[in-house]
Amino acid sequence: MNMPRIPHPARSRNQTSAATDNAPVQAGHDSAVQAGDPYGFSEHTRGLLDCAATLCSRQGGRMTAQRRDVLGLILQADAPVGAYDLLEQLRVSDRRPAPPTVYRALDFLLEHGLIHRIERLSAFVPCTHLSHEDEADPSGASASSSARSGHVVSACGHEHGACGVHAAQFLICRACGGVTEIADTPRILDMLRTVCREKAFTMQSASVEVEGLCVTCTGQQEAGTER
Amino acid sequence: MNMPRIPHPARSRNQTSAATDNAPVQAGHDSAVQAGDPYGFSEHTRGLLDCAATLCSRQGGRMTAQRRDVLGLILQADAPVGAYDLLEQLRVSDRRPAPPTVYRALDFLLEHGLIHRIERLSAFVPCTHLSHEDEADPSGASASSSARSGHVVSACGHEHGACGVHAAQFLICRACGGVTEIADTPRILDMLRTVCREKAFTMQSASVEVEGLCVTCTGQQEAGTER
DNA sequence: GGAACAGATGTAATAATATTACATTCTTTT
DNA sequence: AAAAGAATGTAATATTATTACATCTGTTCC
């Protein structure tokens, strides 16, 4: 029962210069280093980026350098990242992107189900599905072993595809700021689907955000309060 | 199966001048008109306001004129209202409140479970619980027939009290903008509680926001698309 | 009654988040 | 190689929210 953990205290820092340009970054061969990776992405991150590029192109989307950089920064961060954080991190070398640049990349990544927006934090996290895909096939060549008809439905219930329902559930710790995506059970989403069906509501996207105290912080608070 | 409906196209308009001041507005006797009601609140709204004042004072909160006005405007509106909408509506007669005024009132009302914030819209709606209370006892004198220990747990699962869990579920229609609070079933919240318990997460507040098409708009879209 | 305290409000400035509108460049298609 | 569509660059601005500090109000305690 391991949950993808995204430990908070936001504002991670990365490094250096500019990337190439508008052309779709090809995934699969020679692992993206040749495409320009000025932010010091880890090997793991680059693997996920390649995987994302594959998912993307299946849906007829183009994983451009801009979008790749933004996704990479979000993947690399150990906490939800705000749009203006990203903006700042993108201000390396000669490039000085303006807000629309980042927001457009974010919109694209959201539409393709590669990231989620946490409304209560106005911040973004990677979709855990990406990691799951990558575990199944780290090469990034095959984005899903069960992929059939052009888009992919993950175990956690949300779809990677322009046509599907985007849904995600998060636990947000008020003490340490840690955010955890609940992606290991379809029960919540199933329940929402049931209720929506009963009310004849067509669900297109859903978000569940629970705030409180994570395991660790619950323990610490009890320790501090007792006696 | 009637759901409280909040039909959207925001920015409702109300009228006129300033209210009294800092003193807690008393509920129950003579229905609040004597307290100054410059916004043309309906009788129904005034009833709910009185009811809210009662709930509030039970929790040791003070329903001041400022807070009452804000709650009234939210109750009166037929759609989620933004903070700056409220600000504008409060700009009647001599008063020119600044943002903190409104945000403070909103914080108070949120803490006391009288309103909810819809994250995806950055806007506020009344908690349906208030209406339910009022139906049970329109006088506002008894805020809950089953009130025992100082705070109230409604059928919809959220509590009215500084100590409780604040939770709400919304259906948001992308076509007409209508927002519906799901308050007629505890299933969703129960499920969240279960999952949080499994993950040893202490839930303090939860929000579920589903975007899509309401019954009406689903029908209309299908009609427009078919053939 | 009046001092002291806490809570609530007033006010100005500014921070943080997000969008609009339009020009330019790149990619793909024809 | 031209046309069409997608993506990006850029400047300005809109929207939402907060900080910091002064003032006022109501309550409590003597």
Image (cartoon, coloured by chain):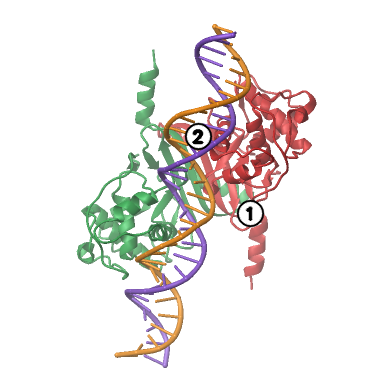
Chain colours: A red, B green, C orange, D purple
Front in this rendered view, residue B201 or D5: D5
Give the CA distance from mark 2 to mark 1.
Answer: 26 Å
Identify the image quadrant of residue A41.
Answer: top right
Q: Kindly tell me whether residue B37 is visible in this rendering.
A: yes
Front in this rendered view, residue B193 or A56: A56
Q: Looking at the picture, how far across and down is residue B185, in whole percent? A: 43, 44
Residue placed under numbered mark 1 in the picture: A214
The three-letter amino acid code for the residue at tag 2 is Ser
Q: Looking at the picture, how far across and down is residue B10, in whole percent? A: 33, 42
Q: Residue at x 34, y 43 (%)?
A: B79
Task: Classify residue A121 as left or right of residue B68.
Answer: right
Q: Secondary structure at mark 2?
A: strand
Front in this rendered view, residue B139 or A33: A33
Looking at the image, residue B32 lies above or below residue A140:
below
Looking at the image, residue B155 lies above or below residue B25:
above
Quarter placement of the C terminus of chain B: top left
Q: Looking at the picture, how far across and down is residue A177, in whole percent? A: 62, 53
Q: Secondary structure at mark 1?
A: loop
Residue placed under numbered mark 2 in the picture: A205
Label 2 marks which chain's residue? A
Q: Looking at the picture, how far across and down is residue A192, in whole percent? A: 50, 37
Quarter placement of the N terminus of chain B: top left
Indicate which disc residue B74 carries.
none
Identify the image quadrant of residue A70.
Answer: top right
Q: Residue at x 36, y 25 (%)?
A: B219
Looking at the image, residue C6 lies above or below residue A10:
below
Label 1 marks which chain's residue? A
Q: Kindly tell me whether residue B126 is visible in this rendering.
A: no
Task: Classify residue B35 as left or right of residue A93.
Answer: left
Front in this rendered view, residue D30 or C9: C9
**Which one is earlier in the sequence, the residue at label 2 or at label 1?**
2
